[in-house]
Amino acid sequence: MSTEAQVGHFPAVDWEGGALPYRVGHRKLGMWLFIVSDSLTFSALLIGYSYLRASNVWPTPFPFYPSIVFSSVMTFCLLSSSLTMVFGVSASSKGDKAKARKWIFATIFFGTAFIVLHLIEWRHLIHEGMRPFYLPEHWVQVFTTTDGVPPSPLFGATFFTITGLHMFHVASGAVYLTIVALRVNKLKHEDIEISGLYWHFVDLVWMFVFPLIYIMSVDVGHHAGL
Amino acid sequence: MDAHAHVEEHFAGSNKLFISIWGWLVLLTLVEIFLAYKPMPIHLMLAVLLGLSIIKAALIVAYFMHLKFERLSLILTLVPMLLVCIMLLFVFFPDSFRSWGLRYKFNEAPPVAPAPTEEP
């Protein structure tokens, strides 16, 4: 405990051993490091998407309904799930495990709603004729430039890869949170907080996927051009 | 830092604070959806949307993920590392403009929308 007293005056002492330099447990630090590495995965994918977009004629085919309506409601679900997760962690910090479990189940509910809505939205696009390496014929006609350059068929590849990987993260998070909720009495508070970190990260990634994939691809009717 | 030493044992931040953060996140999302239907140059749109996203991400990391209430040493370990790595990913980005130039040989000017008379 004497190290704790010295912390304020001379933090370098922490690094000599026997203290927690970051004042977080090793598991929480591990989750933070995982989040940093996973952020880089998504950054690489989003930058790759932007690269393709900047070097190709790119279609902007998403209609207000269903695409934008669905993705907006999905964003609302994820933001709300983050809020309920914070409430869960907050209840757990006060020792109220039953309440924490209830809020975590609410989080899982919103997460599952997100996945269901996203799958319906995927189904709409697949039904429309969008595939990883093909565009629907009527999109090709609409978005071909005046000098005859067709839009890039990689639209589907980038869309399905990025939203698919994100959906996989949401699904894994829902499984992770289910395990945490069921074992909430056996887990330490910090373990519940760590599961919250992961869940918020999934929400954070969507804050970049939603504008870059959905908002930037809205069909505003200025066809036959860029 | 010392003033927070006791608070850090618990989960700092009231439910009221978290609800207001959630309110801001929803509001900024609505602004993004509104902007989607505002005609503007694509570069400006991209800059505004990315700016809003970074603000939203910062709110989530600072309050929901609690990083604001952690020790400065943790923040300094995680954030600059991530930012530097992301900036390094952009090293290849200018190549996209070169490959656009290779792919599409426009005669003089970039493609333009058809004249209004051609519209049905």
Image (tube, coloured by chain):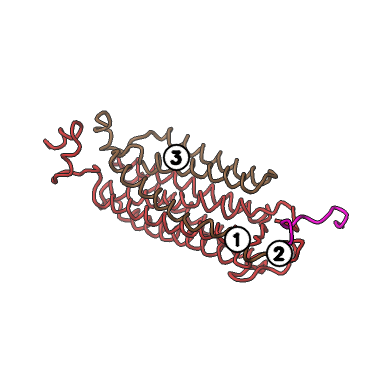
Chain colours: A red, B brown
The residue beneath circle 1 is: A55
Callout 1 crowding tier (Cα within 10 Å): few <14, some 14–19, many ≥20: many
Callout 2 crowding tier (Cα within 10 Å): few <14, some 14–19, many ≥20: some
| Quarter that holds the C terminus of chain A | bottom right
* Mark-to-mark CA distance, 3 and 2: 37 Å
Callout 3 crowding tier (Cα within 10 Å): few <14, some 14–19, many ≥20: many
Q: Is residue B115 magenta?
A: yes
In-front residue for pair A135/A104: A135
Residue drawn at point x = 70 percent, y = 66 percent:
A150
The disc labelled 1 sits on which kind of residue?
Ser
The residue beneath circle 2 is: A139
Residue drawn at point x = 39 percent, y = 40 percent:
B62
The residue beneath circle 3 is: B59
Q: Is residue A147 magenta?
A: no
Which residues are drawn in magenta?
B106-120
* Residue B88: image location, x then y, percent: 42, 54
Callout 1 secondary element: loop
Task: Establish if B45 lies above or below A5.
Answer: below
The disc labelled 2 sits on which kind of residue?
Trp
Would you say A46 lies left or right of B118 here?
left
Q: Mark 1 vs mark 3: same chain?
A: no
Callout 2 secondary element: helix
Sequence-wise, the earlier of marks 1 and 2 is 1
